[in-house]
Image (cartoon, helix red, strand yellow):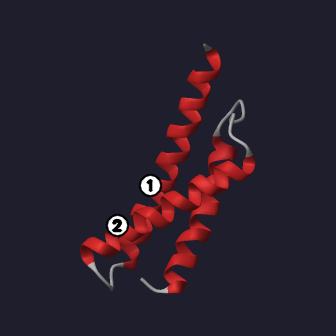
Amino acid sequence: MSFFSLLWLAALGLGIGALGRAVVKDGTPMATWMTAVVGVVGAVGGGSVIHAILGDGHMFVATLLGVAMAALLVMAITGWQRTRGES
């Protein structure tokens, strides 16, 4: 995977993290920097998995999975932190 592909996925992850904060109604218990880090890790991780499975030339699929992984990670960690804080 090229450097620019990783940079693209990282930028998407930052965007997904920001959208995750904007969509949650009552605010998220995660810090802003943590949301950004989780978004980047999810996007780069998801894109890397697709690249490892399918190889070069599948950047669209890698982008889709990267965005999905970033969104799922942000939702999962936010939900976990909310349930942990209620007890």
Return the residue at label 2: 49
Return the residue at label 1: 69
**Cβ–Cβ below 8 Å for labels 2 and 1?**
yes
The structure residue drawn at horizontal position 65% and vertical position 37%, both measured from the top left corner, is 24
Residue 10 place in picture, x, y as percent:
58, 69
Q: Which labelled disc corresponds to residue 59?
A: none
- For label 1, the crowd category at 10 Å Cα-Cα, with few meaning under 14, some 14 to 19 and many 20 or more, is many
Residue 21 place in picture, x, y as percent:
68, 45
How many numbered circles does the render carry? Answer: 2
The structure residue drawn at horizontal position 72% and vertical position 52%, both measured from the top left corner, is 33
The residue nearer to you, when weighing 58 against 32, is: 32
Seen in the picture, residue 59 relative to 19 is either above or below; the reply is below
The structure residue drawn at horizontal position 63% and vertical position 56%, both measured from the top left corner, is 37
Seen in the picture, residue 50 relative to 69 is either above or below; the reply is below
Q: Tell me how far mark 2 sits from mark 1, CA to CA.
A: 10 Å
- Residue type at the position of mark 2: Val
- Residue type at the position of mark 1: Met
For marks 2 and 1 on the same chain, the one whose residue lies earlier in the sequence: 2
Q: Nearer the viewer, mark 2 or mark 1?
A: 2
Query: Image check: 48 left or right of 77?
Result: left
Seen in the picture, residue 73 relative to 59 is either above or below; the reply is above
The structure residue drawn at horizontal position 50% and vertical position 47%, both measured from the top left corner, is 73
Disc 2 on helix, strand or loop? helix
Residue 20 place in picture, x, y as percent:
62, 47
- For label 2, the crowd category at 10 Å Cα-Cα, with few meaning under 14, some 14 to 19 and many 20 or more, is some
Would you identify the image quadrant in which residue 61 lies?
bottom left
Residue 53 place in picture, x, y as percent:
25, 71
Seen in the picture, residue 73 relative to 50 is either above or below; the reply is above
Would you identify the image quadrant in which residue 58 lies?
bottom left
